[in-house]
Image (cartoon, rainbow, N blue to C red):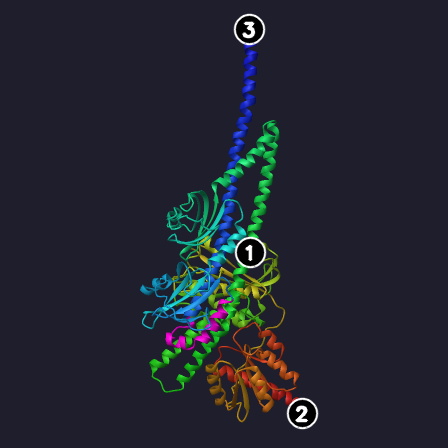
Amino acid sequence: MQSARRASLRVLGLAMVGCVLLPLLLLGSGAITIRRAAHQEADERLARTADVLHEQALKVFQSTDVLLENLLEMTQGRSDTALRTDFPHWHDLLKAMSSRLPQLQSIWIIGADGHISATDYTAALPDLDISARDYFVAQTGRDDGLFVGAVLQPLLDTGLPFFGVSRRRNGPEGGFDGVITASLLPADFVKFYREIGQAPGSFLTLMRTDGTLLARYPPIPKGAHAALRPPILNAIAGPLDRGILTSVSPVDGRERRIAWRRLDPYPVFVMAGLETAAIRNAWLGTLATHLVFGLPATALMLVALWVALIRTRALFEEAERRTAAEEALQRTQRLEALGELTGGVAHDFNNLLMIVLGNVDRMRRRPREASDIRALDTIVAAVRRGEALTRQLLAFARRRALYPEPIDLARQLADMRGLLSHSLRGDIALAVETEAPPGSVMAPGPFVVKVDPAEFELAVVNVAVNARDAMPQGGRLTLRLRRVTLNAERDLDDLRGEFIAVSFTDTGTGIPPALLARVFDPFFTTKEVGKGTGLGLSQVYGFARQSGGTATIASVPGVGTTVTLFLPASTEPPAPRQSQAAPATAPGTGLRVLLVEDNGEIVAMTRAWLERLGFDVVAAASCMAALTLLDMHSYALLLTGMVMPGGMNGLELVRELRARDQPIPVILTTSRDDPAQQVRWEGVTLLQKPYEEQQLRAAVTAALVGIRTQDEAAKA
């Protein structure tokens, strides 16, 4: 009996212990699981926030860097005296450029003596000596690329705190010729951080890699020491460009979980942090909720955990979809920003190129030695590269107008064989193959698509050049044409219908899988500095998408790479080949032309060309002035620019003449492709800047022949 009682007590005791231990074990297990989930969720949220900060900051620095590079090219060879003398022009130009980038406070061109040469900040040339500023001092010793300075107070009374981003201007012999700097506003970054950093215990920071603070939200508390070296700099100094860690801040002594991203190639990084106390509070709050409902019934707690697991999984899936949508939106915004920036500078950039071409033409007409002629040819080649660079940027941003026509790709590639051979090296074999559809007994071809022939040739050459660089020891490049039917496959941008696939397969070094997703991005290149702009394959992708298709890439390191263009098949017959007619000697003999252009150098150059064509040239600096001259005299031809001062552009001038019933042949010149299709609908001859004398002659002949043909038809 005693033994039975003892056994019963033992069983009861074990049961009581079990009733206590089992909930405790479940509670401990649940607490560990919830804690791990809370930390994992916090890390993922920090990583997503850091990615958003990285994309925003990278867009700002890339846009600013492109602007500075363009200004370096525009001011190349211009002395400080020339810049200061023409200060109103440069003030207006810089004002127009900075207005497209809201994060900029101002742009400054600074001479080697530390005094201002041009700026958009003040309407008059300020007498300031900024030779002691860090963004100036850092560039005096050597050219280290883009320099990011510390936050400074403006020397003038107006303006907000800023940090300077500068690039060095090199003189003809490589010496120091001053700097070009853009003033970025920390307040602009803080405003963005405030919108996404409202979670309790969070902070967002933009910092230089040496620990200098550029922007922070929330602000540093008063009395805190912001100059202390944060421990995170030890991680930043390593080879990784991103990471997440736990660190105690030297600013306020609080422990935080921090996700960081480096903005390569710029000497800055971003941080998104959350206090570990906030993570712990979130975990304890969740645990307390489970304690209330979990201790009375272990089974209920298990069900609650199961429901929480399902909900967490759904939240993760939703977060992944949201992240994918955010990445797509950010990519689109980057392209739009690039397109806006490119379009903004295209007008002035192409005007500068045209002035260079005109002066080269003028120098060629004088007796020159062979070395001088070679130097002029080099200048023309450089101008063409600049023109191609602008065209590639516009193509990727889908802002370049295309002029499609039906072409047979087999015939087009055969005609390009000589051009491709010159683009490749002698140790690279070139082969062009065609394939019939699977199961077909018909011979392959024709492979007709309706695309812009010039852009197609540029895309082919860009792919060939990339293949050449990937085969330094020689190899084989195979171009293959085939017909394919697409059924809205996910990896082909949901395309449907009949397409012609143009594949370029090389036997080169290949591309690592981690880089494949970025090869079509603008400015991305694996080549050494100075050997590639990173715009070749982006032009290929932009051309394919604008033509109604797409482009893909596949690569195996050490084996080779295949780039494929999918272009919509066309049922139209190929356009016949046209022969070039010999131009007339002087189509404008005895005729008067009205030239409307606000750039004096372009006026002088175009006047000389028109006079060589036999025209009597009258010039006007605005469309309103041109209307006055048209009321006073009759003209055989009107040559006007698209973008003109005074509130009326070239196309509006044409419409005004038609409203007045003043028929006159018109040639409209433009630096951008945006109005090209609209101009053609108006029936006006379009001449793209920069143009040369031969192109002007062809446009004049086309315009005069068109109006004469109409007159003859009216008389008949």
Question: Which mark is on residue 305?
Answer: none
Q: Main secondary structure of the magenta part?
A: helix
Residue tagged 2: 715
Residue 66: where, in percent of width, then height? 45, 65
Question: If the image is split into quadrants, where does the N terminus sit?
Answer: top right
Please determine whether, in this image, residue 606 is positioned above or below residue 237: below
Query: Residue type at mark 1?
Result: Ala
Image side of residue 293 versus residue 621, left or right: right
Q: Is residue 541 visible?
A: no
Question: Which mark is on residue 2?
Answer: 3
Magenta residues?
73-99
- Judge depth for marks 1 and 2 and give the one in front: 1
Query: Residue type at mark 2?
Result: Lys
Q: Is 83 within the magenta?
A: yes
Question: Which mark is on residue 328?
Answer: 1
- Judge depth for marks 3 and 2 and give the one in front: 3
Q: Is 512 within the magenta?
A: no
- What SS does tag 1 mark? helix
Please determine whether, in this image, residue 74 is positioned above or below residue 561: below
Q: At x 31% / y 64%, what residue is drawn?
A: 141
In space, the residues marked 3 and 2 are separated at their CA atoms by 136 Å
**Residue 276 or residue 495, whichever sits in front:** 276
